[in-house]
Image: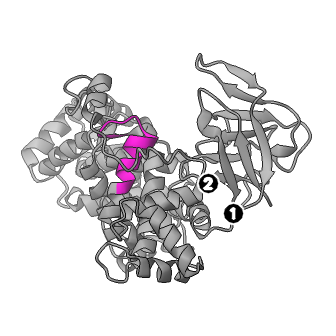
């Protein structure tokens, strides 16, 4: 299969101009390509009647450009129709200048490295839009739609420590480079990573961590600097063989100040030029500092941009605050009785689903999510005496399930029915979303304990129930009488 070069787009969405390298997998039973430049851009078939260029592999409903495919072509270069692009006014129009033409695949080691990332990120659940939403909610703790470098670093450390991400991603030089590239080149120039920049951030974290692996392999002196001797030997070990004069010429391209040493940031710029030689190398926005970053932020969000002015309806900090309140109540019989009497206003020691719903809506709107409420209720009566009422002795268990089912459902946004299933890798990712760090062995042991029939699959409801009991065991002890 050939690579595909897209060219000719000017103005809005000129970012589609790139060389797209073929991926090993099919998408919608058709070939697909990834941008050679390290950015979230894909060329693929919608599965219906279009070739599209978009930020992720999906159904193509949201894209930057597309061309109609009426003849079942093997790739977009075979389509005679003109490309359609979205202009500055938001209208889609035909652009006669855009061209798709086949070009030879690159056999460069670093281009191959870039192509391998799509498969690896899919392995870790970082390509599906739903998985990205879940991870963003975990990262954006206070729900203000922006995250700092410190918050990103904390997320990476925890996901690596919990075994959800590979250890090589916990690399400070690579993380700093990923952060700077995201905010200064892929983003809008402020000091924060926004939700719309999140996919680019993840791609950059993987890319620069992989480059640091390569850099460290070349840097045999382990001083975070590469000299000519290390460069020559190291590039040869990567399969990029050069004679002495070629190696020296390449080294001088990287060592722009003639100091005889190459730093990681210079190595990154060198690789970028190899991978995407058409990029404007005279100004690397991911390399230089953003002196005007604070001004960009204030212009966009106001002078108090570092405060929580952009607020979502629900965020993780709200759940954490309410969790503390619920846990405290579990050990306070007076508080529990107060809540129970609010529910059981007629004093018959049983409450219905409708009464529970009304109490939640009036007192704890954070927990007003009907699917989670229904599952918490069903779980409580199923574990109780099996009737349709929640009794006084089942109230603590109801509160625990009510809170944690809501938190889990909010994190995962939408749950596709009772038959949603998790395998062990998905189970470990769920643990990571709640900072529940376990070793791989511990996670597998817990999974096996839930998976009583040994089928390798657990239901999402079973995960919710297990997490509730693990997070708040006191909800299931010492029932109030």
Judged from the image, the secondary structure of the residue bearing numbered disc 2 is: loop
Q: How many numbered discs?
A: 2
Q: How packed is label 2: few (under 14 Cα within 10 Å), some, or many (20 or more)?
A: many
In this view, 92 is above or below 31:
above
Q: Position of residue 274 (x, y in %)?
A: 57, 60
**Left or right of 160: which side holds 248?**
right
Q: Tags 2 and 1 in contact by the CB under 8 Å rule? A: yes
Q: Nearer the viewer, residue 412 or 335?
A: 412
Q: Position of residue 459 (x, y in %)?
A: 51, 60
Residue 315 seen in the figure = yes
Quarter residue 64 falls in:
top right
Q: Position of residue 115 (x, y in %)?
A: 61, 62
Quarter residue 301 falls in:
top left
In this view, 335 is above or below 224:
above
Query: Which residue ends up furthest to the top in the rendered image?
Result: 89
Q: How packed is label 1: few (under 14 Cα within 10 Å), some, or many (20 or more)?
A: some
Q: Which residue is mark 1?
A: 106
Task: Please give the name of the residue rendered at 21% of the width and 47% of the height, measured from the top-left corner.
Answer: 323
* Residue interval drawn in magenta: 177-193
Quarter residue 113 falls in:
bottom right
Q: Position of residue 122 (x, y in %)?
A: 56, 60
Task: Please give the name of the residue rendered at 26% of the width and 46% of the height, measured from the top-left corner.
Answer: 399
Q: Which residue is mark 2?
A: 36
Residue 349 seen in the figure = no
Judged from the image, the secondary structure of the residue bearing numbered disc 1 is: loop
| Quadrant the N terminus occupies | bottom right
Q: Nearer the viewer, residue 269 or 406?
A: 269
| Residue 14: in magenta span | no
| Residue 191: in magenta span | yes
In this view, 67 is above or below 74:
above
């Amino acid at each position: 299969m050939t690579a595909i070069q897209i060219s000719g787009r000017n103005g809005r969405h000129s970012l589609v101009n790139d060389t797209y390298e073929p991926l090993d997998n099919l998408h919608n039973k058709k070939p697909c390509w990834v941008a050679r430049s390290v950015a979230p851009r894909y060329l693929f078939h919608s599965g219906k009647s279009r070739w599209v260029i978009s930020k992720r592999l999906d159904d193509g409903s949201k894209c930057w450009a597309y061309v109609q495919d009426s003849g079942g072509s093997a790739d977009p270069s075979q389509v005679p129709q003109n490309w359609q692009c979205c202009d500055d006014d938001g209208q889609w129009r035909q652009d006669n200048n855009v061209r798709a033409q086949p070009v030879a695949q690159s056999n460069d080691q670093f281009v191959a490295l870039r192509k391998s990332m799509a498969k690896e990120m899919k392995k870790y659940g970082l390509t599906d839009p739903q998985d990205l939403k879940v991870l963003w909610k975990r990262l954006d703790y206070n729900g203000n739609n922006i995250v700092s470098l410190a918050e990103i670093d904390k997320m990476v450390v925890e996901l690596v420590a919990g075994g959800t991400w590979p250890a090589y991603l916990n690399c400070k030089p690579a993380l700093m480079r990923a952060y700077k590239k995201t905010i200064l080149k892929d983003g809008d120039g402020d000091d924060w990573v926004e939700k719309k920049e999140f996919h680019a951030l993840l791609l950059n974290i993987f890319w620069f961590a992989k480059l640091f692996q390569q850099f460290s392999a070349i840097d045999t002196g382990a001083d975070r600097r590469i000299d000519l001797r290390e460069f020559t030997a190291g590039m040869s070990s990567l399969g990029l063989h050069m004679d002495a004069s070629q190696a020296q010429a390449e080294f001088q391209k990287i060592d722009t100040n003639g100091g005889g040493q190459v730093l990681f940031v210079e190595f990154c710029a060198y690789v970028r030029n190899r991978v995407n030689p058409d990029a404007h190398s005279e100004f690397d926005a991911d390399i230089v500092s953003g002196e005007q970053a604070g001004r960009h932020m204030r212009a966009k969000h106001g002078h108090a941009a570092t405060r929580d002015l952009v607020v979502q309806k629900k965020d993780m900090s709200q759940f954490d605050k309410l969790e503390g309140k619920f846990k405290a109540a579990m050990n306070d019989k007076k508080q529990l009785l107060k809540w129970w009497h609010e529910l059981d206003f007629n004093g018959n020691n049983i409450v219905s689903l409708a009464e529970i719903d009304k109490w939640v809506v009036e007192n704890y709107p954070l927990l007003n999510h009907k699917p989670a409420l229904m599952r918490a209720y069903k779980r409580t009566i199923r574990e109780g005496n099996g009737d349709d009422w929640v009794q006084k002795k089942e109230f603590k268990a109801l509160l625990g399930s009510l809170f944690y089912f809501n938190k889990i459902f909010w994190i995962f946004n939408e749950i596709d029915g009772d038959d949603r299933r998790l395998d062990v890798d998905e189970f470990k990712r769920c643990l990571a979303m709640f900072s529940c760090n376990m070793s791989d062995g511990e996670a597998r042991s817990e999974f096996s304990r839930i998976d009583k029939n040994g089928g390798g699959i657990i239901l999402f409801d079973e995960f919710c129930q297990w997490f509730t009991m693990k997070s708040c065991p006191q909800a299931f002890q010492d029932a109030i009488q």
